Amino acid sequence: MTNPGVQPVLTDGTLTLRPWRADDADAVHRACQDPDIQRWTQVPVPYTRADADGFVTELAPAAWRDGTGVIFAVVDGSDALLASIGVVDLDRPNRSCEIGYWVAPDARRRGVASGATALLSAWVGEVFDIDRVELCTAVDNRGSQAVAARAGFRLVGETEHTFRGEPARMLKHVRDLAVGPR
Ligand SMILES: CC(C)(COP(=O)(O)OP(=O)(O)OC[C@H]1O[C@@H](n2cnc3c(N)ncnc32)[C@H](O)[C@@H]1OP(=O)(O)O)[C@@H](O)C(=O)NCCC(=O)NCCS
């Protein structure tokens, strides 16, 4: 399916979620050298400049264009890159989606992941016509589990997930979205 229209910009007044641009590649390349991003997310390892270019110019725009999800750059008021967040798996038949994120090392522990997760979750329900947002964290990824709790997700238990092409036990966190009349 094709998603018509331009990927929007979302903001809560502090954080802004905007489409990726080609000139974000440097900052993405720098952030993705971080060992925790390489450990806990599915970015390529090693992470090259070509990976960053492909992410901002092809992979991220394709998600929205093709209707398979959406990936945003999270920036501050000066348009400095703080994080990446997006819908990494959209399950329209089950009216749910899974989100994923990373935060640049120098932007951590100031509410970026939890704020961006809350902002994205408040918007995805209507645009994708879904009722729930899921987040899967590695059992040892205490930081991301804390983000889930702060962003209003509840822990529903362990789940088998595919991580870097292999089955892995992960924790599933769910946020039910407010459902209006249909
Ligand atoms: C995990 C990560 C996303 C947290 O981002 P962040 O912007 O620093 O998180 P926030 O500032 O929104 O923190 C939200 C809560 O999590 C807690 N938290 C954040 N990082 C933590 C850590 N490493 N250990 C324990 N708690 C942590 C914060 O103290 C805060 O708790 P509070 O609500 O009780 O005050 C970031 O460290 C990161 O990008 N890690 C590598 C990639 C990754 O793990 N991605 C997620 C894969 S599922």
Image (cartoon, helix red, strand yellow):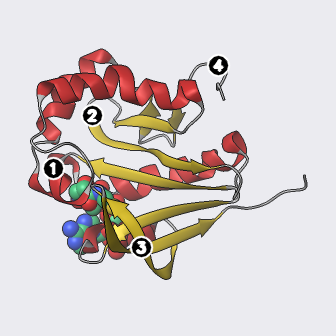
Q: Marks 2 and 1: in contact by CB < 8 Å?
A: no
Disc 3 or disc 2, which is closer to the eye? 3
Task: Mark 3: give few (<14), some (14-19) or many (20+) Cα within 10 Å.
Answer: few
Residue name at image x 62 percent, y 45 percent: 123
- Provide the residue designation for mark 4: 5
Say if 154 sits above or below 57 in the image. below
- Provide the residue designation for mark 1: 105
Q: Marks 2 and 3: in contact by CB < 8 Å?
A: no
Q: Earlier in the sequence, mark 1 or mark 3?
A: 1
Name the amino acid type tagged 2: Leu
Say if 49 sits above or below 30 in the image. above
Whether residue 110 is visible here, answered yes or no, is no
Ligand 1 closer than 8 Å to the CB at disc 4?
A: no
Disc 4 or disc 2, which is closer to the eye? 4
Ligand 1 closer than 8 Å to the CB at disc 1?
A: yes
Residue name at image x 19 percent, y 42 percent: 44
**Number of numbered discs overlaid on the protein picture:** 4
Q: Look at the numbered disc 2 and give the secondary structure of its residue.
A: strand
Name the amino acid type tagged 4: Gly
Query: Residue at the top extreme?
Result: 22
Task: Mark 2: give few (<14), some (14-19) or many (20+) Cα within 10 Å.
Answer: some
Disc 1 or disc 3, which is closer to the eye? 3
Cα separation, mark 1 vs mark 2, equals 11 Å
Q: Earlier in the sequence, mark 4 or mark 1?
A: 4
Cα separation, mark 4 vs mark 2, equals 24 Å
Disc 4 or disc 1, which is closer to the eye? 4
Residue 160: mark? 3
